[in-house]
Image (cartoon, rainbow, N blue to C red):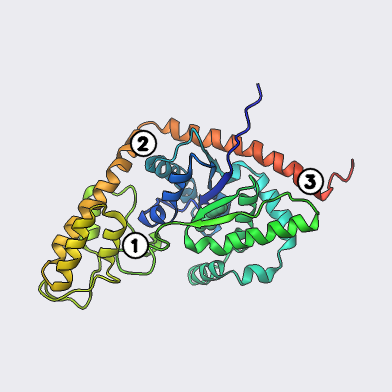
């Protein structure tokens, strides 16, 4: 019996398997994935071709694939209605990347601000692998492969979605066929969550992240160590709420608005200490993380379910990829031998 085609529009989005996911991933992107997973047919991709910056630590890539899948299940992504896929399990991605790279001049990648920043960062520690330079092209292939309409991502990914739109236009124009739709980006409710150290961005490598898998005690310790208002020396000094990471997190994660407003009012008057503000933040974060922890332990005890989700999703994505590649070859007329 042939499977009924899914009538929903498609999402393709993903992450690179470099380790566990944190609160920044949640508000920047994951939250949208969870919200949209029923409305769209979703392809959630683990981009293991795109971590050549970890070339000297391949075990990290292997481990992270399962870590990411577990994080996804823990936050409530549902592999019954969506497809979890491992990029290299669909080698058609490599093939499509190679063809599409024909229509992207080097300068277009060289000017990509996200890639530029990442390469500058990488160059300080490492030489940059050729594969790293080309990862945005691979991301283009990821998105175009299932002909995705929507790509919910963090703000730093916007240049890559713009590149995807440009490549789709070029390909369609070149071969005079509407093979690929131009996908729209969608950024999360908080485009960039600051780190616990007040740095512009929460990131694992900066050691300023609260992970979705952190236990209660770890969250409490990290919150206690958070940067607040550097101008405030005593609890009786009037404090600043604007730009204060502790209040940014309250705004992002504490659903009790009355409590947050009360803390802010007292803070600017110098009538509340950092300890109370932080204790309440840790409680709010732990309440937010509790259901995630519960689902995580369920799946941790059942690793076969994690593997099964990756297996089924990858195999479905491969079928979709083969259909797209047949269209691509047809449009390009590369069936040279008839
Ligand atoms: N580059 C993305 C990141 O670093 C991960 C990614 C790979 C991705 N392929 C994608 C995101 C396709 C969206 C769509 O987070």
Q: Name the residue under label 1.
A: 207
Q: Which quadrant would the N terminus be assigned to in this image?
A: top right
Which of 11/269 is in front? 269
Direction from residue 206 to residue 79 in the image, left or right = right
Question: Callout 2: helix, strand or loop?
Answer: helix
Numbered disc in front, either 1 or 3 = 3
Q: Mark 2 points at which residue?
A: 300
Quarter of the figure with residue 90: top right
Query: Callout 3: few (<14), some (14-19), or many (20+) C-alpha neighbours within 10 Å?
Result: some
Residue 80, percent across and down? 49, 32
Which of 59/34 is in front? 34
- Residue at the bottom extreme? 231
Q: Is mark 1 within 8 Å of ligand 1?
A: no
Q: Which residue is drawn at 28% across and 66% down?
A: 245
Q: How far apart are marks 1 and 3 (CA)?
A: 46 Å
Q: Residue at x 23, y 59 (%)?
A: 223
Q: Is residue 55 visible?
A: no
Q: Residue at x 51, y 67 (%)?
A: 118
Q: Distance between the residues labelled 3 and 2?
A: 42 Å
Label disc, if present, on residue 329 of the rendered structure: 3
Q: Is residue 123 above or below residue 13?
A: below
* Label 3 or label 2, whichever comes before in sequence order: 2
Which of 227/90 is in front? 227
Q: Which quadrant would the C terminus be assigned to in this image?
A: top right
């Amino acid at each position: 019996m042939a499977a009924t085609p899914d009538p929903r529009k498609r999402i393709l989005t993903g992450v690179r398997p470099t380790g566990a996911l944190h609160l920044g991933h949640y508000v920047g992107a994951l939250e949208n994935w969870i919200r949209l997973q029923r409305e769209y047919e979703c392809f959630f991709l683990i981009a293991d071709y795109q971590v050549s910056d970890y070339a000297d630590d391949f075990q990290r890539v292997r481990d992270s694939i399962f870590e990411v899948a577990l994080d996804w299940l823990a936050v409530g992504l549902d592999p019954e209605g969506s497809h979890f896929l491992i990029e290299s399990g669909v080698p058609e991605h490599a093939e499509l990347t190679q063809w599409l790279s024909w229509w992207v001049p080097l300068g277009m990648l060289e000017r990509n601000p996200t890639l530029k920043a990442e390469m500058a960062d990488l160059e300080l520690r490492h030489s940059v692998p050729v594969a790293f330079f080309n990862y945005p092209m691979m991301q283009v292939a990821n998105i175009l492969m299932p002909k995705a309409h929507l790509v919910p991502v963090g703000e730093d990914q916007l240049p890559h979605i713009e590149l995807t739109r440009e490549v789709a236009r070029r390909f369609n124009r070149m071969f005079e066929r509407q093979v690929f739709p131009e996908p729209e980006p969608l950024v999360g409710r908080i485009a960039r969550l600051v780190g616990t150290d007040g740095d512009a961005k929460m990131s694992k490598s900066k050691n300023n992240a609260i992970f979705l898998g952190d236990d209660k005690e770890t969250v409490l310790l990290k919150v206690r160590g958070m940067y607040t208002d550097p101008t405030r020396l005593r609890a009786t000094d009037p404090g600043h709420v604007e730009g204060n990471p502790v209040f940014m997190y309250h705004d992002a994660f504490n659903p009790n608005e009355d409590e947050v407003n009360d803390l802010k009012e007292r803070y600017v008057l110098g009538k509340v200490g950092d300890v109370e503000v932080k204790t309440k933040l840790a409680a709010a974060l732990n309440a937010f993380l509790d259901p995630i922890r519960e689902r995580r332990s369920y799946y941790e005890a059942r690793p076969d379910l994690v593997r099964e989700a990756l297996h089924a999703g990858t195999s479905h994505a491969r079928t979709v990829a083969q259909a797209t590649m047949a269209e691509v070859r047809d449009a390009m007329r590369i069936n040279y031998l008839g």
